[in-house]
Each structure stands twice: as structure tokens, then as C-alpha cells.
Amino acid sequence: MSPSETATVIDSTSTRRCIIAADLHCDGSARRLAMLEALLRSCHQLDASCYLLGDLFDVWLGPGQLTLQQTRREVEALQRAVAANIDVVVIPGNRDFLLDEAFERATGVVVGGDHLLLETGDQRWHLSHGDLFGTADVGYQRLRKILRSGPFRMLVRHMPLLLCRALATFLRRRSRKSLQRKDPARIQPDLQLIGQLVESGFDQVVCGHYHRPSEEFLERGGSRGVFTVLEAFEDRGAHLFIEDGVVELRYLPS
């Protein structure tokens, strides 16, 4: 089953210059706020669009989180970036899958579907958070469908924020315990699935989620492509800078 059969898609976009990062995990701390602001400054200085591949926030509890003091500074940083004509697109991750239209209205940031089709230079890029590539983790994929379903989203919108926070804490604890018990092979990206994307014409497939940076060159059906797992931005500020299809791995200054 291909990602396009299991995921929502926003329209493809094209750009000459962009920055791609994943797993910022903004949590209200001064350190992660400073890293987000530095990334957005880089986008402004380079006149580059910004694509954030999931888990921008360590947790997102729905529209009610826009009222929280700990979130206000991150929201304001995104508002300033958009006001400065930076195009910012966020693909929801497994921790902030409840990002929605309310967040778009408040920040001006575009909340995408499960993956984004990007054209830059003469290349086609497939951008996603990456959790859909973990096909062997059947339990997670089942839970993912439930948590992203319309009924669950409707329920969360009408839940008190305190109850949403308790639910998020419960889910994170279960997730940590589950990861400790799982065979590591079950939570690796499915290279056969990614190979299908390369065969369908993608030159680059990029995701986050796995927190272990890697790069693999794949050849399928006469087509060649590169599969890249990004290092979590929260660690060292790792991000890709792309100009007309030319890729450079960069880090925020330490």
C-alpha cells in the first residue's frame, strides 16, 4: 500500500529556495524557542520557504492550546515570520496531529496533509513526517487511524483543556512503554514502500520521526532516488537548505 493510498495530500508546490526541518518539539522552553526563532531568521535572510516535517510541538492539545502561556511565544514567532512574507508549511506529526484550521488562522502557517509534493530545480521531492513508513508497527498504525479520525477530533474540540492534557500524558506514557517492548526492526521505515515512491518518479524522499539521521540511495524499476531521514532539529538544529535542487545539510550555530 502506497502512502498516497493512506494519507491526505495537499497540492504540490514549487520553490527555488527552501529550508526543511523536522522534530523541533517546541515545549515552551527558552532553548527550543530560540532554536525556532533562529530557523525562521535563516529563512528570512535566505528568502527561503520553510517546511517543517512534523512534531513542531512536543504536544498539541487542539485549539485550546492557543490560549496557553507556554505556547504564546512560539505562536508569536510564527506570526512574525508569516508577516515577514516567509511561507511556512507544517506537516502534522505524531505529537501534534491535532494542528488544524484554528492554528492556521492564528498563525498564518499552512497545515498540510500527511505528505507534501515539492518541485525544486528539476527534481520531485516527497516530504512527510515519516510515521506512515513504519508499516511493520501494526499497533501504532491502528492507533494512528483512530486518533486522526473525524470523531476523535470532534471529541477533542469539545473536551476541557485540562482533560486533553491528561489524555496526552496518558498516551505519551503508553507510547514510551510500548517502544521499550517493541523489536527495533518493527519501528524502521519500510524501504520497499519508499522504493515504490522512487519508482513512481520521486528524486528525493525526506522525513523525520525516527530521530536517527540516515541517507540511502535506492534504485527501483530503472529510477534512482535518495531517501533521507533528518536528525531531530531539537538536538543540534539540523536542517536542509535547498536551492534549485542542490541540497546542503546545515546546523544552527552552537
Image (cartoon, rainbow, N blue to C red):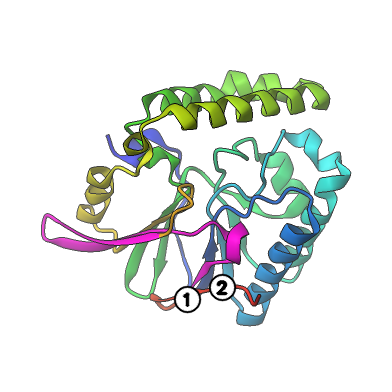
Residue 53: mark = none
Circle 1: element type:
loop
Q: Amino acid at mark 2?
A: Tyr
**Residue matched to label 2:** 251
Residue 32 point in image, percent of width and height: 72, 58
Residue 43 visible here? yes
Q: Is residue 96 placed above or below 167 in the rendered structure?
A: below
Q: Check if residue 138 falls in the magenta segment.
A: no
Give the residue drawn at x 70%, y 71%: 38
Between the C-alphas of marks 2 and 1, the distance is 20 Å
Residue 148 visible here? no
**Residue farthest to the left, as pictured:** 222
Q: Nearer the viewer, mark 2 or mark 1?
A: 2
The quadrant where residue 206 appears: bottom left
Q: Nearer the N terminus, badge 2 or badge 1?
A: 1
Residue 238 point in image, percent of width and height: 54, 67
Magenta span of residues = 214-241
Residue placed most toward the observer, 15 or 25: 25
Give the residue drawn at x 37%, y 38%: 184
**Residue farthest to the bottom, as pictured:** 45
The quadrant where residue 94 appears: top right
Circle 2: element type:
loop
**Residue matched to label 1:** 16
